[in-house]
Amino acid sequence: MKDVRHETFCIRYTENGGNATEAYNFTFPAKHVAVRKRLGVSANACNFMKLPHIKARIAELQQSAADQCLWTIQQSAEQFDKAYNLAESLNQPAAMVAAATQKAKLFGLMTEKVDVTHNLRVEDARQIVESMLARHGGKVIEGNFRKTAG
């Protein structure tokens, strides 16, 4: 791009996950909060996003990032395939399972479950529940949780 500020805006927008206002603030910093309010930063950022050369550059940067990500995933998948094949040729079923498991996790086919337990006394748990219910208009009656009207 010819204008360095336009390029900076596009890069920042792509890096921050698509927050145009933050990208605009980063690219065009105002020295005082009052000045920012007067300028209407969100409106300016929105108008900036409508410019054809800005939209095109952002699309180009996003495509580049997606290509790099896909390359990394593809490369990792190939490495797990090689590990699986090597384990198979060496007759090592545990290593085969490990490679297949990692590949499945890479593609989001498996998730890890985490068990969270607490060693609370019954009275402590009751106090916690009562305080939570109080914030939401409920109370504990004879060991049961009831939502009160109102």
Image (cartoon, grey):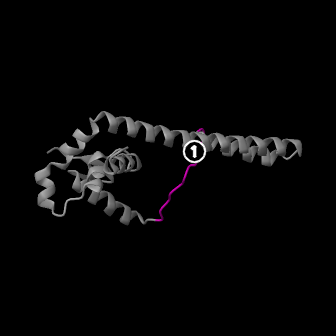
Give the prevailing secondary structure in the magenta stretch: loop
**Residue 49 sits above or below residue 146 on the image:** above
Q: Position of residue 114 (x, y in %)?
A: 54, 53
As drawn, the residue found furthest toward the front would be 2
Q: Secondary structure at mark 1?
A: loop
Residue pictured at 71% horizontal, 41% vertical: 78
**What is the quadrant of residue 143 in the picture?**
bottom left
Q: Position of residue 116 (x, y in %)?
A: 50, 57
Relative to 42, is 115 on the left or the right? Answer: right
Residue pictured at 83% horizontal, 45% vertical: 86
| Closer to the camera in the image, 119 or 144 | 119
Q: Badge 1: how crowded within 10 Å, few (<14), some, or many (20+)? A: few
Q: Quadrant of the N terminus?
A: top left
As drawn, the residue found furthest toward the right would be 90
Q: Position of residue 39 (x, y in %)?
A: 14, 51
Q: Quadrant of the C terminus?
A: top left
Read off the magenta span.
Answer: 109-119
Q: Position of residue 40 (x, y in %)?
A: 15, 48
Residue pictured at 20% horizontal, 50% vertical: 137
Give the amino acid type for the residue marked by disc 1 in the picture: Thr
| Closer to the camera in the image, 36 or 82 | 36
Relative to 93, is 141 on the left or the right? Answer: left
Relative to 147, is 86 on the left or the right? Answer: right
In the rendered structure, does residue 113 fall within the stretch colored magenta?
A: yes
**What is the quadrant of residue 70 in the picture?**
top right
Task: Name the residue tied to disc 1.
Answer: 111
**Residue 81 sits above or below residue 118 on the image:** above
In the rendered structure, does residue 111 fall within the stretch colored magenta?
A: yes
Residue pictured at 50% horizontal, 40% vertical: 64
